[in-house]
Every structure is written in structure tokens, then in C-alpha cells.
Image (cartoon, rainbow, N blue to C red):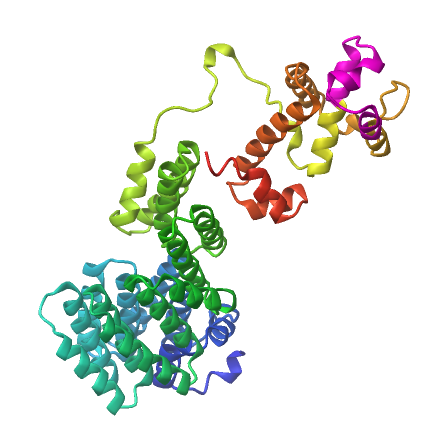
Amino acid sequence: MQKSLISHKKSNEWLEFISRLGLVSMAQARSVFLSGDYTQLDDLGQKALYTAGRGKILSLEGNLIGSKMTLDEAQLVAELRNADQGYLVKDEILAYVNYERAVFFEKYGETFNSMSLYRSAKRLAETETLDSIIDYQISSLALQHGTGSSVADAEAWIHYFSENEMQIMQLLAMRRLSKYFRTHDKFDEAGDLLMKALDLSTQFNYPFIVEQVKNSYGYLQYARGEIEEAREIFEALVNDLESNYLKATVMENLTLTYYNDEEYDTAAGYLDRAIDHSQKYEILSLIPEQCLFMGDMHKEKFSNPEMATHYYDIGSQVALRMAEYGFSLQGDRLKVINCFQNRPKTGYSIPDTLGIRQDPFAFSQGKTWKEINDLFQFLLIQGHLESGINVSDLPGKLDLKASTYYAIKRRLGQHGYAFEKDKSNNIVSFKKDDIIALKTYVAGLTDLTWSEANHQFEGEVVEYLFKLVGYQKTKLAEKLDISYPTVLQKTKSLTRG
């Protein structure tokens, strides 16, 4: 959207537009706020509103730090405008910016900051519309924390928003009250509200809210013990969601359904996807709790403390990064830090007195699985030949049929590996030190059969590469140029302890 197309709009019109857009269509919101550049706007009011809109959309996308920094910038612009106009006592734009910042902090569990900003916004609000929305948020927080509001108040707000045709607020209020009912085990009341909200959001054609309500209904069914129905709802949702944040949440919920049924491999698969997705889109608020759950699963269900420590480490780093930007260390953020700090202090490190260890698998970095496997098998056969064994005895020593042995040699020859010294060899494409380290490793396998040696090598080199890509199976498949099912098969033992 070009500047010339927006300059004629009044600030109060843009305020209404911004406050609605992200909750109506995430695709449109991205187009307006995440693609355009409004830094050159001359009107400070519009600039503050656009910046707040961008912060709102980043929050809906789960980009925690980007959202906070953008909303902080919006506040600075709005306060500058307020100062330029003589320090207005009532200022709808500054009120709206404070309101969006309050919503942001409430979403991420910073209740004290949120309530302070709501009150500040209320003092500044000029219109009845914004004033009523702020009063509703304050009332909802009080109900949530049991500090002075009631279900009757929440129902009165839903009626108020309906009577005043404030459709989005009506739907948000219905969804929020349904959550209150669910957390107090009033499942029938929660379900009735969500069904009404689903009908209305479909009728009003608000696709993003439709997705949110469906996810909420799926989680309600999970809480009621209707696991199969919940799973069907989540599986129908997960691939077509507009919001990256909501997609990560739905994958988390799918994890819970399979975990409930003790299908831990499938649960870990969905949670692995959720963590990968959250890292890709900087959905930092979800990563600590995801990694805490995954770490506990590897420790308690797969008996794999090293993998558990890996996930605790990721979650801990994100929690500390959040703390650097002013988010308190509480709940799952604090728990995952404690889990990492209290991890077993054992591992595979080599004592300093032994000097630097040359890594036998360093050669594999940046290579495909075919290239890795070919080099290993070439060096394994060559190692046997250089030991002085009679060539005719080698197939028997490796427990291979002669035809299989010569087929392997022929395949390696076609891939550029020649056993005759005067012919070209693919081995020259690897670093000399890496080859020496791998040869030393291969020398320790000469008492094994062909199958045993290959099995041991595959398990160890795959574990080595799996760590390098952060235990992300999709990324490992890409690096090795093999299919995802093949990666699942090769890493199965690593994820089960």
C-alpha cells in the first residue's frame, strides 16, 4: 500500500481498521503491516497507529521480541505526538497504543504490566468504544484471577458488544468466557458458548477467529477426555492455518492427544515439528514450554538424558533471551532453566590430559548420505586389503557372498573409488586429517562382519550429524539428501534411548 493511498484517512478511522484487521484476516494483515514501509509518514498519529498495528500482527504471529520492540516504538511515537500537541490529557491514539501493549503483556503472562497499561489507556481514552473495550479487559482479568468480577459481568459484556454491533469483541468475549468455564470444569457451558461463537464467526466471515474457536473447541474435547474427537479437529486444522502461532499451538495439542494415548513416538514427532516451526518463525513464547515437555518426555519415556538435556538447553536459552527483553522468569520458563542447570553433569567429553581428539566423523559434514557411506565402505574394504589378507578370503571374513562383495566393489568403482593405486580416487576430495581420523576409526572395526561394521558406523555417524542439526529430522533429511521416512528409520534408536 503506497503512502499516497493512505494519507487521506483520518487517524480514528485507521484506529478502527487496525484494531480489527489482524483478527479478521491474517493474510491481509501481513500484506498491510509486514510488507509495507510506513517509516516516512509525516503524520505522527498515523505513524504511531501503523507501528502499533505492526506490533499487533507480530504478536498474533508469536514473534515475541519483534512485537515488543515494535509496540515500544509505537509508544515513543505516540508520546512524541502527545508532547507536540501540548501534553493532551485525553489522547485516543496514545490510549490505543497503551491498550495494545496491555493486550501483549497479558498474552505472555505479565499481568502486573498489563493492568497498569490498561489503566493508563483508560485515563487517556476519548471515545466510548475504546473506553468500553478497556473496561471489559480489566473486568476479564479480575474474573480470571478471582479479584472482583463475575460470570454475570462477563455475560453482560457479551450482550453489550452484541447490542452495539462490536462483533469481534463479542466473539473474543465468548471465547474467553468459554475458557473460564473449561478451567472450572463447566464443560457443557463452555461447549455451548464455543458453538455459538463458531456459528457467528462463520456468519460474519472472520476466518482467523473461526480457526481460533475450532482450536478452542478441540482443546475442550481433549479436556473432557474425548481424545479421538479432539484429534480429528486438530488434524483437520493443522495444515491450513493462517497464523503461524496458532499452527504451533495446534501441533502442541496434537502432541497431547497422542501422549494421552501413550503413543510417545507420534507425540514426539508432532512436538518436534512444533519446536522446529516455532524456531523458524521466532515464536519464542512457546519454545520454553515445548522444550520442557520434550525434554521430560525423552528423560521419562525414552530414557535418553542426553536428548532431554539438548531440549532443556534450547528452552533455557530462549527463556533467558526473553528475560533480556524484560519478561519475568516464571512458570515453564523458570522450570526449563532449572532442568538444564540441574542436568546430570556427565557426557562424552574427553579429559584435557588426553589432548585434542581428532573427530572420526568430521569428514561427513556437508556430504550426502551416499558420499558418506561410499567413503566408509571404501576405507573398510581397503583397510582389510592393506592388512595383507588374501583377496579370495575377504568375502568370507566379511560374511558376504562373493557375488555381493564384488557387486559392492563394482558400485564403489562406478562412484569413483578405485582400489588400484594408479587410478583416480574420490578420496582426494576430503581433507587429509579427516581421512586419517576416519581410517583410525575403521581400523577398530576390522574384527566385525560387513553388516556389523556398517550398522555400528551408521548409528554413530547419524547420531553425530543429528546433533549438528539440532536434532531436527527434517533438516537432517535435507542435509543428507535422503527421504524423511529414511531419516525416521535411521534415528529411531536415538529417539528411544
> Can residue 87 be seen at all in this image of the molecule?
no
Residue located 44% across and 66% down the image = 232
425 relative position to 352: left or right: right
Q: Nearer the viewer, residue 395 or 341?
A: 395
Type of secondary structure dominating the magenta stretch: helix
Q: Nearer the viewer, residue 130 or 384?
A: 384
Query: Can residue 386 be found in the magenta stretch?
Result: yes
Vertical order, 461 against 127 (above or below):
above
Where is residue 198 shown, x and y percent of the image? 36, 79
Residue sitting at the far right? 422
Where is residue 212 shown, x and y percent of the image? 38, 71
> Can residue 9 be seen at all in this image of the molecule?
yes
Query: Can residue 392 be found in the magenta stretch?
Result: yes
Give the position of the C terminus as an image quadrant: top left
Numbered-mark total: 0
Where is residue 386 shown, x and y percent of the image? 78, 12
- Looking at the rendering, the stretch of residues picked out in magenta corresponds to 379-408
Tell me which corner region of the image, top left, top right, bottom left or bottom right, holds residue 19.
bottom left
Q: Nearer the viewer, residue 82 or 196?
A: 196
274 relative position to 173: left or right: right
Residue sitting at the far left? 148
Tell me which corner region of the image, top left, top right, bottom left or bottom right, holds residue 427.
top right
Q: Nearer the viewer, residue 122 or 137?
A: 137
466 relative position to 78: left or right: right
Where is residue 45 shown, x and y percent of the image? 36, 77
471 relative position to 295: left or right: right
Residue located 82% across and 34% down the image = 415
Tell me which corner region of the image, top left, top right, bottom left or bottom right, holds residue 207.
bottom left
